[in-house]
Amino acid sequence: MTAEIVNLRQARKRKARSEREKTADANRVAFGRSKAERQLSGKTKALETARIEAHRVDQSTPDTGTEKPD
């Protein structure tokens, strides 16, 4: 049985390099979009938010039923 000799400095550098690559890949996905894609995504999100807000029931003024109809 022979053990493999490992240079710890090189191993640390190799690990750091791979971590930076993972971060770079994630950033490419998150920030590597064209202006049109970013705008479309923003408009879609705004539309979804508006639809959700349109269906919201306002809880700030409880309906007591004491008002007389005109």
Image: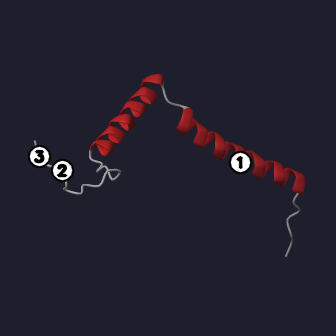
Element at label 3: loop
Q: Quadrant of the N terminus?
A: bottom right
Identify residue for label 1.
18
Q: Position of residue 9 (x, y in %)?
A: 89, 52
Relative side of 6 to 60, left or right: right
User: Disc 1 residue type?
Assistant: Ser
Q: Is residue 15 left or right of residue 49?
A: right
Residue in view at x 30 percent, y 48 percent? 56
Residue 32 falls in which quadrant of the image? top right
Q: Is residue 28 left or right of residue 41?
A: right
Helix, strand or loop status at disc 2 = loop
Q: CA distance from mark 1 to mark 3?
A: 71 Å
C-alpha distance separating marks 2 and 1: 68 Å
Q: Which badge, 1 or 3, comes first in the chain's sequence?
A: 1
C-alpha distance separating marks 3 and 2: 6 Å
Amino acid type, residue under disc 2 in the picture: Glu
Q: Position of residue 69 (x, y in %)?
A: 11, 46
Q: Position of residue 8 (x, y in %)?
A: 88, 57
- What count of labels does the image hold? 3
Q: Which residue is mark 3?
A: 69
Against 19, residue 36 (above or below) is above
Give the residue displayed 86% in from the left and 72% down from the top: 2
Q: Nearer the viewer, mark 2 or mark 1?
A: 2
The reply to whether callout 3 and callout 2 are in contact (CB within 8 Å) is yes
10 Å crowding of disc 3: few (<14), some (14-19), many (20+): few
Classify mark 2: residues with Cα within 10 Å, few (<14), some (14-19) or many (20+): few
Q: Nearer the viewer, residue 57 or 28?
A: 57
Amino acid type of disc 3?
Answer: Pro
The residue carrying pointer 1 sits among few (fewer than 14), some (14 to 19) or many (20 or more) residues within 10 Å by Cα, namely few
Which numbered circle lies on residue 67? 2
